[in-house]
Amino acid sequence: MALDEFALIGRYFRTAQLERATDASATALGIGDDAALLQLAAGQQLVVSTDSLLAGVHFPERYPPAELGYRALAVAVSDLAAMTATPLAFTLALSLPTVDEPWLQAFSLGLAAAARDFAINLIGGDTTRGPLNIGVTVLGQVPAGQALTRSGARGGDLLCVGGPLGDGAAGLAVVQGESLPAGLAIAGQDYLQQRFWRPQPQLLLGQQLRGVASAGLDISDGLLADAEHIAESSGVALHINAAQLPGSEALSAWAPRQKLDWMLRGGDDYVLLFTLPAREKARIAQWRAAGHAVSVIGSVHAGSGVLLDVGKGYAPIAGERGYQHFRSAND
Ligand SMILES: Nc1ncnc2c1ncn2[C@@H]1O[C@H](COP(=O)(O)OP(=O)(O)OP(=O)(O)O)[C@@H](O)[C@H]1O
Ligand SMILES: Cc1ncc(C[n+]2csc(CCOP(=O)(O)O)c2C)c(N)n1
Ligand SMILES: [Mg+2]
């Protein structure tokens, strides 16, 4: 007989690895009551963000469930990194078509691996029967007034990115079994699959941006699309120099046009994009020395929108900027 809802929760989600992934816990009351209780430290603000994952939209229809568990939490935690928050806890709203115990076991283990990596405990959720849908809400804390928003960029700031671009889209091509360039070695394929299934939210870099960066977010839809959010919220123009975009060695196996398109528009990268007042420039070398692959990719100016230089001077972007769930009003 299939497990009932409560036995399922007990076996796969009310586990030590998920409920007590980290000791540094703010959980005053966890799974099992009508709601959970969190105790924030004095002077901290609560940071809250929700993400949904759907097969065929956020990940391929054929997928390894353990990897899906890891990715579901990683992409959600990336929004905490973008706000410069420290993770506290998360909830999981899961809709499942059937009770498939090997699937649940693998998903739960992948989720627990991410919970351990990002030091975040599962404190509750909701489990229903329906088409597969994974909803993760992450909670974090940040000293009051110090969260990094999208609205503080000012003319004269540098535009920086926290890691390589384009790996998310290239990783998706690898995991979908698309035809791959001959120059892509097995090690490069493995690297890109990891980048897709196990993105590493830049929590430590994010925390170092508190009180230093002027605006920021994490790149989920694509560099151009997400840069547009900063430009619009801050009321500035962002200049991006294509020649300065950082890409991985694995990505260089593709033709330059494909590589550039993925770096600009591919999305799924989960690296930070932020603006830095010029007086803070010396920090970039310190971050790099500490292992954060920060690069300057452009600058902030008076004006509006995102302008891109692909070798012929800065010009507004024509065409697509990144991933959009609703491509046109008629979709
Ligand atoms: N259904 C909704 N109701 C209320 N607010 C929403 C809803 N959907 C999105 N938002 C809000 O709109 C803003 C942009 O959402 P979006 O999901 O694009 O965030 P993002 O950080 O740009 O992308 P990602 O979800 O990939 O991290 C966020 O502040 C989000 O909370
Ligand atoms: C099968 C498959 N096809 C396409 C993509 C690309 N993709 C989907 S949603 C998204 C933006 C972030 O989503 P959201 O804004 O909902 O957080 C991106 C870049 C994928 N990951 N898997
Ligand atoms: Mg985000």
Image: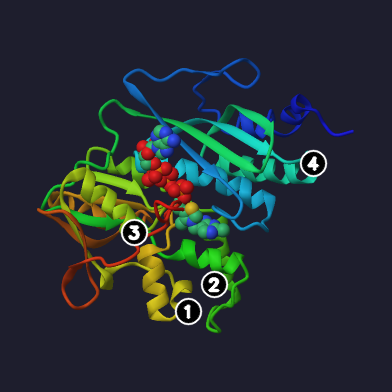
In the image: residue 182, left or right of residue 77 = right
Mark 4 sits on what residue?
A: 101
Position of residue 89 relative to residue 215, above or below, is above
Residue at x 17% of width, y 59% of height: 299
Q: Amino acid at mark 2?
A: Gly
Q: Position of residue 257 (x, y in %)?
A: 38, 78
Instruction: Point out the tag, 4 or 2, that comes first from the N-terminus.
Output: 4
Q: Residue at x 35, y 64 (%)?
A: 320
* Residue named by callout 2: 188
Q: Is residue 325 shown above or below 91? A: below
Q: CA distance from mark 1 to mark 4?
A: 39 Å
Tell me whether the residue at label 1 lies in contact with that at label 3, contact meaning CB atoms closer than 8 angstroms: no
As measured in the structure, the alpha-carbon distance from the residue carrying label 1 to the one carrying label 2 is 9 Å
Give SS at disc 2: helix
Give yes or no for contact between labels 1 and 4 (Cβ–Cβ under 8 Å). Answer: no
Label 4 – label 2 distance at C-alpha? 33 Å
Sequence-earlier tag: 2 or 3: 2
Q: Residue furthest front?
A: 330
Q: Nearer the viewer, mark 4 or mark 2?
A: 4
- Crowdedness near tag 2: few (<14), some (14–19) or many (≥20) residues, C-alpha within 10 Å: some
Residues at circles 2 and 3 in contact by the CB criterion of under 8 Å:
no
Per the model, the C-alpha gap separating discs 1 and 3 is 20 Å
| Location of residue 22 (image quadrant) | top right
Q: Amino acid at mark 3?
A: Leu
> Where residue 129 sits: x, y (%)?
71, 34
Say what amino acid the circle numbered 4 marks. Answer: Glu
The kind of secondary structure element at disc 3 is helix
**Residue 253 has which mark?**
1
The crowding category of the residue bearing disc 1, from other C-alpha atoms within 10 Å (few below 14, some 14 to 19, many at least 20), is: some
- Determine whether the residue tagged by mark 4 lies in a helix, strand or loop: helix
| Front label number (2 vs 3) | 3
